[in-house]
Image (cartoon, rainbow, N blue to C red):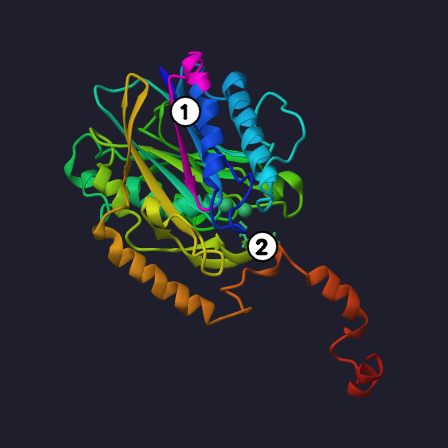
Amino acid sequence: MITLSVIKADTGGFVGHSAVHPDMMQAAEAQLKERKEQGIIIDYQVARVGDDIALIMTHRHGADSELVHRIAWETFQATTEVAKRLKLYGAGQDLLKDAFAGNVKGMGPGVAEMQFEERPSEPVIIFLGDKTSPGAWNLPVFRMFADPFNTPGLVIDPKMHDGFDFEIMDLRENKIARFRTPQESYDLLMFIGSPNRFVIRNVYLPGGTEPVASTSTQRLSLIAGKYVGKDDPVLIVRCQSGLPAVGEVLEAFTQPHLVEGWMRGSHCGPLMPVGFEQANTSRFDGPPRVVAYGFQVNRGRLVGPRDMFGDPGFDRARQTALEMAEMMRRMGPFEPHRLPLEEMEYTAMPQVMRKVQHRFQPADQDAGEAAGAR
Ligand code: F6R
Ligand code: MG
Ligand code: MG
């Protein structure tokens, strides 16, 4: 059995929240190279999207391994040091605790991990999103594993014809539940259609125990109880041979959808699929974007990455996303571009309300009295 761990954090932005400084990438690379040489991990890739670094690691220690989480924590300490030295923006932003306590979950970084028996050939795609939140994967993951208009394999491939099990998580109540598709697709959609509360955590073969897709589900604001940074999520998808083909998995991103997390974590915008060269968020601190790192896993080694969205085949999707961005920006500070009050990560509402609350009078009061309260 091998374990694939993807642990990501924003430990400082270059410039503002737009990208990661190359020196930080080098610092992460040096840390993981050493751990690989010591034989603690089998292989690694330091990846990034926008201002987030993702540590992609393979090893034999299983999910939630203290050893592997400690490596991630120490690596992010090292990248934070670089960010502090260069006075980069928001140095150490996602490291919410001072000392490592055995597992990085709940400490800020986003985590997706899966343990599996490597197949004779194991194509895997790792998606990294910036300026968005974990629920952003709900729609594309549903498309990959449950929508025959996206994934003809569900109809044509006898191995996929029985559908898949989706494990969803209620982020507010901290509960999980499983649904089988296609039988329970409508029940499933009822929940995952509210992506700020219900997120897909894992996908399994029917009745299976080894995930075929896994997401990070951490929401920093729910951990810290207030806005403390972004929840930019990751997604791991295994492909082919009875699972969606690489092209079916990627196809799920060709019709951009609106996600939460743009500018100040408080705006809705389109999720734009981009190649590695375009992984820098700039316009209005965005638009939200996703990159796709493709690997063939070979006895735990990561053969790759291939830049899966670095293909003119996605130009049209990018164009559509930009048109959607334009349309949303026209709304300025109005919903639905701006998120509803309770969902906004930044809000001046309590202060504004305190300042003017005495002006709010029962609506059936006399107009003159209301004016007097001004
Ligand atoms: C961060 C993000 C950005 C910031 C914005 C304001 O990932 O989404 O849009 O929220 O740049 O940042 P501060 O409050 O740090 O000036
Ligand atoms: Mg940031
Ligand atoms: Mg980010």
Q: Is residue 201 left or right of residue 228?
A: left
Residue 68 magenta-drawn? no
Q: Residues within 10 Å of mark 1 (few under 14, many from 20)?
A: many
- Is residue 216 visible in the rendered structure shown here? no
Residue 188 picture quarter: top left
Q: Where is residue 218 shown, x and y percent of the image?
A: 53, 37
Which of 298/205 is in front? 298
Q: Where is residue 145 shown, x and y percent of the image?
A: 30, 39
Q: Where is residue 132 shown, x and y percent of the image?
A: 47, 49
- Is residue 317 visible in the rendered structure shown here? yes
User: Which residue is located at x 51 percent, y 26 percent?
Assistant: 72
User: Which residue is located at x 60 percent, y 38 percent?
Assistant: 85
Is residue 277 shown above or below 118? below
| Figure quadrant of the C terminus | bottom right
Q: Is residue 11 left or right of residue 248?
A: right
User: Which residue is located at x 28 percent, y 45 percent?
Assistant: 309
Is residue 341 shown above or below 252? below
Q: Where is residue 219 shown, x and y percent of the image?
A: 56, 41
Mark 2 sits on what residue?
A: 343
Task: Spot the residue most to the bottom.
Answer: 368
Is residue 276 shown above or below 201? below
Mark 1 sits on what residue?
A: 57
Q: Are marks 2 and 1 in contact (CB under 8 Å)?
A: no
- Hey, what amino acid is under mark 2? Glu
Per the image, label 2 sits on a secondary structure element best described as: helix
Per the image, label 1 sits on a secondary structure element best described as: strand
* Residues drawn in magenta: 34-50
